[in-house]
Amino acid sequence: MKKKIMFVGVFALVLGAICISTSFAAMPDANNVKEFHEGATVGCTVCHTEGNFKELNSYGNAYNDAGRNVDAVKAIDDEDSDEDGVSNYDEIKAGTNPGDATSK
Ligand SMILES: [Ca+2]
Ligand SMILES: [Ca+2]
């Protein structure tokens, strides 16, 4: 019984550490977008696929390919990563998703 409780405890600690490290890893990226687009609301789904935060959407891939920093945000601003007819800049300013063509 003690071994089972110990295993569950260790598993919970490892899972918690993974969740925390994943969240903190993504924060600098969201902050890069916020830094360039002052006042913008930037959630996880700006760069990641809805419901699968391990997978990048088209905007996330473009940001990653451009260098994954503030300059990358600027470099892809005039692009239309999700090909919905609205530029990444306009989508972020409007609060729509630059990586989701159904959001414009
Ligand atoms: Ca777009
Ligand atoms: Ca869009």
Image (cartoon, rainbow, N blue to C red):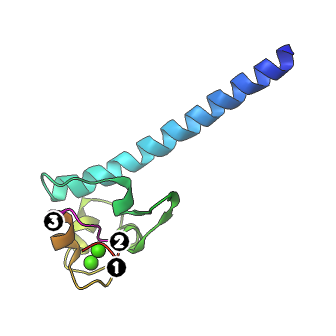
* Magenta stretch contains residue 96: yes
Q: CA distance from mark 2 to mark 3?
A: 13 Å
Judged from the image, the secondary structure of the residue bearing numbered disc 1 is: loop
Residue 22, compared with residue 37, is above or below; it is above
Q: Quadrant of the C terminus?
A: bottom left
Judged from the image, the secondary structure of the residue bearing numbered disc 2 is: loop
- Picture quarter with ligand 1: bottom left
In which quadrant of the rendered view does residue 12 lie?
Answer: top right
Residue at image position (34%, 79%) is 82
In which quadrant of the rendered view does residue 6 lie?
Answer: top right
Reading the image, the residue beneath label 3 is: 94
Residue at image position (35%, 46%) is 27
Residue at image position (45%, 62%) is 50
* Magenta stretch contains residue 1: no
Residue 45 got which mark? none
Reading the image, the residue beneath label 1 is: 82
Tell me if label 2 and label 1 are in contact, CB under 8 Å. yes
Residue density around tag 1, few if under 14, some if 14–19, many if 20 or more, within 10 Å? many
Reading the image, the residue beneath label 2 is: 99
In which quadrant of the rendered view does residue 97 lie?
Answer: bottom left
